[in-house]
Image (cartoon, grey):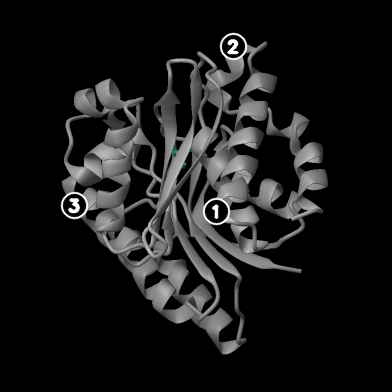
Amino acid sequence: MKKIVTIQDISCYGKCSLTVALPIISAMGIETSVIPTAVLSTHTGGFTGYTFRDLTDDIMPVSEHWKSLGLEFDAVYTGYLGSVKQVELMSDFFDMFRTEKNYIIVDPVMGDKGVLYAGFGNDFISGMKKLCGKADIILPNMTETSFMLDIPYAQAEAENGNEDFIKSCLVKLTDLGCDTAVITGVQKNGTHQGAVAYQKSTDTFASSFRNHINAYVHGTGDVFSSAFSGAVAKGASLQKSLDIAVNFTADCIEATLPIPENYMNGVYFEKCIKNLAEISENI
Ligand code: PXL
């Protein structure tokens, strides 16, 4: 059985980060270890007054204990990190747990719809850019892409849908130092939405699209990144990993559409997870 470690927060209410990564990756038939970076009462993308218990001081002791046990992972997948210090610790973690054949996957969770999440500023963006340089694969959305490449979001939004613009962003993202960059939330023809990837070592692009769904549901980036990381850890090609993650995310959004009052709480991945488990048996 393949093994992933995923490092991100637990938002106790509002399906995102570990409360989606753990069930989704496990359903794909992968042993999933976690390092929670913080415990929040809710996610920060729309709720106010949330609690935040910082777990930074636990990250290295957990990592060192694992190292003493000789643990190895087929993929390391980081999501929401709560501070610049945690971003720096992830860099150390990568040095400790990188092997010749595993994948280091960074979802540089920082913002959405052109706005940074609460508590993040320029120092966090710089730290995240450095961390992306140490990854094999990074998974930014358009907002994170615009912040990391210093492109005004209005421009990135206006040019989302322009294939050449997306491709040039992808190449610049790999210039940060990672081999593969995947941008999520890319538009095509005004009718489709999906993800586009560039792999520097082979100089190839790949993409996957589904019909555009005109609704904003929170936590979809984490659903995408979890399914994508699971597929990569199981040895799927870049194209197949994109197809699995785009289709699963779109299925989850479609399952959520009838209940708009729940959009802030995340997607109904529970309705689609059985199908993902079945598909994953053949990866
Ligand atoms: O879905 C990304 C995410 C993860 N964790 C926390 C968040 C968010 C986005 O708002 O606030 C705590």
Q: CA distance from mark 1 to mark 3?
A: 31 Å
Q: Residue 101 falls in which quadrant of the image?
A: bottom right
Tag 2: amino acid: Pro
Quarter of the figure that contains the C terminus: bottom right
Q: SS at mark 1?
A: helix
Would residue 273 be found to the left or right of residue 176 on screen?
A: right
Answer whether labels 2 and 3 touch (C-beta < 8 Å): no
Name the quadrant where ligand 1 sits: top left
Residue 123 is tagged as 3
Tag 1: amino acid: Leu
The image position of residue 243, as x and y in percent, is 61, 41
Q: SS at mark 3?
A: helix
Q: Nearer the viewer, mark 2 or mark 1?
A: 1
Q: SS at mark 2?
A: helix
Q: CA distance from mark 2 to mark 3?
A: 35 Å
Mark 2 / mark 3, whichever is N-terminal: 3
Answer whether labels 2 and 1 touch (C-beta < 8 Å): no
Closest to the observer, 162 or 216 = 162
The structure residue drawn at horizontal position 49% and vertical position 16%, both measured from the top left corner, is 191
Q: Residue at label 1?
A: 238
In this rendering, does residue 17 appear at all?
Answer: no
